[in-house]
Image: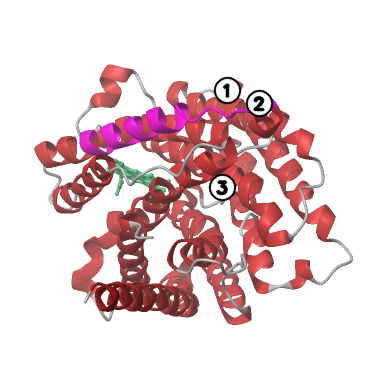
Amino acid sequence: MFNPYFLVAFLYVALAVLGALDASLVNFEVLPFFAGLRWMRVHFITLGVLTEIAFGILPLLAAVRSGSPRPKTRWDIWLLLNLGLLILLIGIPPINVVLITTGGTLIFIAATLLILQLGAMRSETAGAASASGRKFYIVGLAYLLLGILVGTGLWQGWSTWLQIRVPLEVHIHANNWGFMSLLFAGLLVDLYPHFAGRSLAWPRAVTPIFWMMTLGALGLVLGPWFQSNLFSVPGLILHLSATIWLLASVIKPLLGGSKLWTPGMLHLITAYIWILAPVIIAPLIILEVPGFPGAGIEQNAPQALIYGWVLQFGYAILPLLFRRVFVANTPDRLGGNWFSLIAVHLGGTLLWAGIFIADSQPVLHGLAYGLWFVSLIPIVYELWQIVRSGIHRAEDHLATVAEASD
Ligand code: HEM
């Protein structure tokens, strides 16, 4: 089967490698002239890799869970998403308002069409519906719509019109706590039984976890919107409790066995440490503790979250999904190895160390991005092997068909 989203996502993974290398060299002052890559570094990963993969896999997963026939590739959605992305890549560096609005609008329409496609795949049986990831995907994508709206208008004053107090934070929260968190939770619900070989500890907890995450994300979006902890604090408590419940549900069935201690499983679970880091520190920022580098955290924490959590979750889940798409009939196996696991965590630790030890920040951040760069190499190699073997198989198949028709 050919899935065009996965080929594009592979391209962006390769670009993410270059983005990390660039950041490392910029910090070491080897490459000062490339320093404008900041927006791209984050969005190669979030939009280019994870969003791309989500668009490619969610209709397939939802169809399997609902017993619907396998959906055909929606080329309209693929084109809208990728045109939008390309236009943003051209429009963001020079802050060209027309291009940014066009790119954001195209991605917004693509996400809306995907929501409609998933919405139409209702489950045949109520039982299957309760344990499926579909509702996580739909609500996650709705948060993406909000994130796109705020992100597209960030440099155009839309937030004044929308009365948003801290727009960048609303953008990040809608995308991370809303879109990414719900997407990852849905993927865990749908895929865990396959790669772990058992069901989640408490399958009935899936519905309360869904509601807690959905409402938690809403609080975390409304918090910076109105600059009020009356929304942020309950939102954070709800969201975090749901995340911990979900992770406990993932870990408990594996206790005592060897499956927990594989690099792939550890990538998946320990990625969440990097969500907890800013959360633990947040009260100190809110209380404005003297001497605490609040500005440094706001400047750098998003990058740690994207590399430590979003990308690392991808280290485990991308090779599994790529194998499903490119190499039929192979067992579900998570990606990564001990080297990528250690390197990605060391990178996160050094990035945070650099925030607190201001004098050594360039060196520590240079090392952090350098470690993230090397941690990506085994993953890209693994993905490349899978893509290559899929293409070989497709070529062999075509050759056989051609021979048979001669
Ligand atoms: C059409 C979609 C999107 C648009 C137009 C957009 C736009 C933007 C803009 C203009 C910024 C500000 C950059 C700066 O201040 O230098 C930004 C930052 C950010 N965005 Fe997006 N974005 C989009 C999608 C996403 C998605 C899907 C995610 C995550 C899941 C995301 C996560 C972030 C993060 C973490 C930052 C902060 C980066 C940093 O501080 O280094 N964005 N985005």
In this picture, residue 46 sits left or right of residue 237? left
Disc number placed over residue 231 in the picture, else none? 1
Q: Is residue 310 left or right of residue 341?
A: left
Q: Which residues are magenta?
A: 105-126
* Residue nearest the viewer, comparing 370 with 214: 214
Q: CA distance from mark 3 to mark 2?
A: 22 Å
Whether ligand 1 has any atom under 8 Å from the Cβ at mark 1 is answered as no
Disc ID at residue 234: 2
- What amino acid is at disc 2? Pro
The amino acid type, in three-letter code, at marker 3 is Phe
**Along the viewing direction, whichever of 139 and 386 lies nearer the viewer:** 386
129 or 338: nearer the viewer: 129
At horizontal 44% and vertical 74% (from top left) the residue drawn is 386
Ligand 1: image quarter: top left
The mark closer to the camera, 3 or 2, is 3
Tell me if label 1 and label 2 are in contact, CB under 8 Å. yes
SS of the residue under disc 1: helix
Asked if residue 210 is positioned above or below residue 323 in the image, the reply reads above
- Examine the rendering and report whether any part of residue 357 can be seen: no
Please, which residue is most extreme toward the right here? 256
Amino acid type assigned to the residue bearing label 1 in the image? Phe
The C terminus: image quadrant: bottom left
